[in-house]
Image (tube, rainbow, N blue to C red):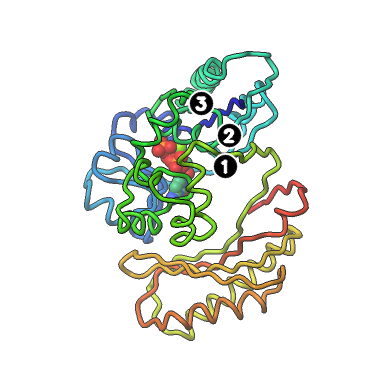
Amino acid sequence: MRKIIHVDMDCFYAAIEQRDNPELKGKPIAVGGSDKRRGVIATASYEARKYGIKSALATSVAKKKCPRLIIVPPRFDVYKSVSKHIREIFHRYTDLVEPLSLDEAYLDVTENKLDMKSAILIARRIKEDIERELNLTASAGVSYNKFLAKVASDYNKPDGLTAILPEKAQSFMMDLPIEKFFGIGQATARKMHRLRIKKGVDLKRMSKIELGQHFGKNGQFYFDIVRGIDNREVDPDRVTKSISEETTFAEDKVLESEILAVLKKQSNNLSAKLVKNKIKGKTFVLKVRYKNFETITRNKTIDFFTDEADHIYKSIEKLYKALKNEREVRLLGVGMTNLDTELDGVQLTLDL
Ligand code: DCP
Ligand code: MG
């Protein structure tokens, strides 16, 4: 039986800003772009979350929800250095650390550098290290696989420490809303709700065949996960899974010719990034955010890996034209996933 910990910092950017500026403590703050520049919120303090302020919300909308919200511009250098420090802390316990983003990571502590038996104790020590050395709090989850560890860290935020022991996993899962299941995003959740799947218990009633019919390959994964089965390993060499270019406009764009020109430029930039990092990919992603902040993505997979701007643009152009858009667009993005870095096991540090 493995011992997996998932650590996730609380209100990461916002907590750092409140730590470094006492005037912001106890107040509703959000880190993000200014409403004057059509910015969006990266994250919000707990005081602000009460008003429904959350990641990806347009700052202008956030200010309407909470007029005394304080908007703080991001300081990515500081977040990166904090991130580096927490990773150093993780590595005191194990080198099997798989970062998922700046503020979260999986650790496999089945065997660990301090020969500690209890993963719960290790999680507590990590939280204490973080608090003492960085004056920030993290939430941790402990279990026997990645999925359960992640669900556990989210269970009691902030400053939480939750363990899901094998004998408790089943009952825990039955009550879990399906939105919290790994890999189930908003669209899948809506589809599940239509099928009257609301919680783990409903999901477990579905046969493997039914799930396959409705959700394809992912159905198999959901079938396993609701039974507490997740054999994914903690992979310290996991590389970036996607790479993208995004632009938010100062003024909305409607003209197709103008939009395609932007997409072409983004395809060129993306290609340059891919070439620079010696990466190729085969799934192109188009992202469009409309004036009303509605955001859609469309993707297309080709059967070979490429880094060429022409290949990228040709697919992106088709995807865009298929939208038959006449709406005002505030943001465009071009991205690539299904990268060949997932094949060769070489760790890449991307400077994005
Ligand atoms: N972030 C972002 N845009 C998003 C989501 C997150 O820029 N759409 C950034 C800001 C967050 C950080 O990534 O501080 C970590 O993301 P989390 O989802 O872990 O959110 P928080 O750490 O802010 O809050 P929580 O306490 O819920 O983990
Ligand atoms: Mg976090």
Kindly report the distance in space between the C-alpha atoms of the residues bearing marks 2 and 3: 10 Å
Q: Crowding at label 2, few (<14), some or many (≥20) Cα neighbours within 10 Å?
A: many
Percent coordinates x, y for residue 232 in the rendering: 61, 41
Considering the numbered disc 3 on the image, is that residue within a helix, a strand or a loop? strand
Q: Are marks 1 and 2 in contact (CB under 8 Å)?
A: yes
Q: Is residue 193 visible?
A: yes
Q: Relative to the observer, which residue lies in front, 89 or 236? A: 236
Q: Looking at the image, is 91 positioned above or below residue 61?
A: above
Where does the image place residue 225, in percent across and percent down from the top left?
Answer: 49, 42
Query: Where 161 sits versus 254, above or below?
Result: above
Mark 1 crowd level (few <14, some 14–19, many ≥20, 10 Å Cα): some
Residue behind mark 2: 106
Q: State the residue at coordinates (58%, 34%).
A: 106
Which image quarter: residue 249?
bottom left
Q: Residue 31, position in %: x, y?
A: 40, 44
Q: Quadrant of ligand 2?
A: top left
Mark 2 or 3: the one toward you? 3
Amino acid under label 1? Leu
Report helix, strand or loop for mark 1: strand
| Residue 14 seen by the camera | no
Of 200 and 76, the residue lying toward us: 200
Q: Which residue is mark 3?
A: 142
Amino acid type, label 2: Tyr
Q: Is residue 282 left or right of residue 141?
A: right
97 left or right, relative to 124: right
Q: Which residue is at 71% across, 71% downward?
A: 304
**What residue lies at 54% left-to-right and 57% top-to-bottom?**
217
> For the C terminus, which image quadrant?
bottom right
Measuring from the top left, give residue 241's x and y in whole percent: 62, 53
Mark with earlier residue (2, 3):
2
Q: Whole-Å distance between the Cαs marked 1 and 2?
A: 8 Å
Residue identifier under label 1: 100
